[in-house]
Image (cartoon, grey):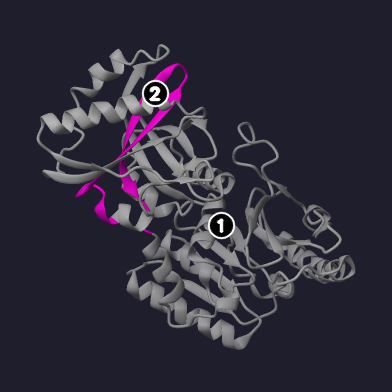
Amino acid sequence: MQKLLFTLGRNPKLSMLELASSLQAEKTGFQILDFSEKAALVELPEGIKASELVKKLAGTVKIAQILVEAESKGNDFSELEKKLSVIDFAQDLGKKFYYTINDYSREKNEELVQFLLGCFKQRFKEERLKAMLKWPKQVQGERKESIAPKLLAKRLGKEHLDLSVLEHEGKVLLAKTVAASNPLELAERDYKRPVVKPELITSARLARILVNLAGLERGKKILDPFCGIGSILQEAMLTGHEAVGIEANRENASACEKNLSWCRKKFNLASGFKIYNQDSRRLSGFLKGEKIEAVVSEPYLGPFLRKLPSEKRARGIIAELSELYEKVFAELGKILGKGSKVVFLMPQIQTMEGKKVGVREEVFKKQGFKAYNALEKQMPNAIPVSYKDKENRIERMVYVLVRE
């Protein structure tokens, strides 16, 4: 077994659920040993590659491998120092490189960090290496990542050594980053497609997270009943799934087909797709021949709101959307088998009166669906997860549901 440290993205709860759902889908024996708002310590079989995991997980910034475990006795770091001395941390980096040390302990230990800085500074000097420290910046009293993710992805293993320290159950764990996500790859899938419509885009990052939350094995079929121009279906195909979409607008349905054809060709995918220019409120009628294993969708969430609406207007918007969603869930109940997952976003609106108005859970409960939490023991009541856009007054609530 190996221990990996996952640095979580800006929505740690969503990142943790994505991580657990993905590992469950792979049917690997894994154990979450510890987690916080910044990182998760996970024990996994040796055969699992961090480089493949970081490409699949959109909610993970980077993955580090635990190389050193030493007993922690107050501020006596003698055992840690001894174990550090036999590891070549700068292997393959050359004579000149940058390095960083990140502290992911629940309670920051400044003496430990300073000890490590002193150790590495002295060691690099003795080995005649020109190692330049990139110190994390202080933002509102918190140390942030000292290097932009896109730069880390480019430099890692070539001209940058990224280390992380974590205190766990009386031990000091030191990890070396072995894989980092590249946000430029996500941006390419967002903005270099044949058809781009900002008002219809679910970001590639969020779309990938939603697909992974379904916890589906490769080769299975995913339906998006509000597919728009294909953001979610694109990520479904990239993760090895067959894609089925429904889009009522003919122009958008055509754009979706163009985008998915581009994706299939550019990334040389074996996965196929089929788009129905139909009304999802009648989907059981035209999807009879399709074996759908999971549903992943960001439906219409109402008008874009730059200002806080009145409670009356918010309730009107939610009532209209609730009627739409209820009809779609009734149809999904007809085609999905027991245990099938549905990952679905629903809005919650902040009003000028200071209230929040959202879709009631009866919309899906009375159609035979209930909330599913991949981390019920570690994070009870995690569903739904809030996902908010700073520019919009509509808060997106991410639901993971299961057919009863």
Please say if the residues under marks 1 and 2 sit with CB atoms less than 8 Å apart: no
From the viewer's perspective, tell me whether residue 38 is left or right of residue 69: right
The span picked out in magenta is 154-182
Q: Which residue is mark 2?
A: 111
Which label belongs to residue 210? 1
Q: Secondary structure at mark 2?
A: helix
Residue at left offset 51%, top offset 27% = 107
Q: Relative to 35, does residue 58 appear above or below in the rendering?
A: below
The answer to whether residue 9 is magenta is no
Q: Residue at x 22, y 32 (%)?
A: 121
Residue 43: image location, x then y, percent: 42, 30
Q: Name the mark nearer the viewer: 1 or 2.
A: 2
Q: Earlier in the sequence, mark 1 or mark 2?
A: 2
Crowdedness of circle 1 by 10 Å Cα count: few (<14), some, many (20+)?
Answer: many
Circle 2 crowding by C-alpha within 10 Å: few under 14, some 14–19, many from 20: few
Instruction: Give the secondary structure at mark 1.
Output: helix
Tell me residue 325's x, y (percent): 76, 66
Kind of residue at badge 1: Leu
Q: Tell me the number on the disc at residue 254.
A: none
Instruction: Tell me which residue sits at (18%, 37%) in the image.
Output: 90
* Amino acid tagged 2: Glu
- Camera-nearest residue between 246 and 41: 41
Q: Quadrant of the N terminus?
A: top left
201 vs 237, nearest the viewer? 201
Tell me where residue 269 sits by quadrant.
Answer: bottom left
Q: Residues under labels 1 and 2: Cα distance?
A: 40 Å
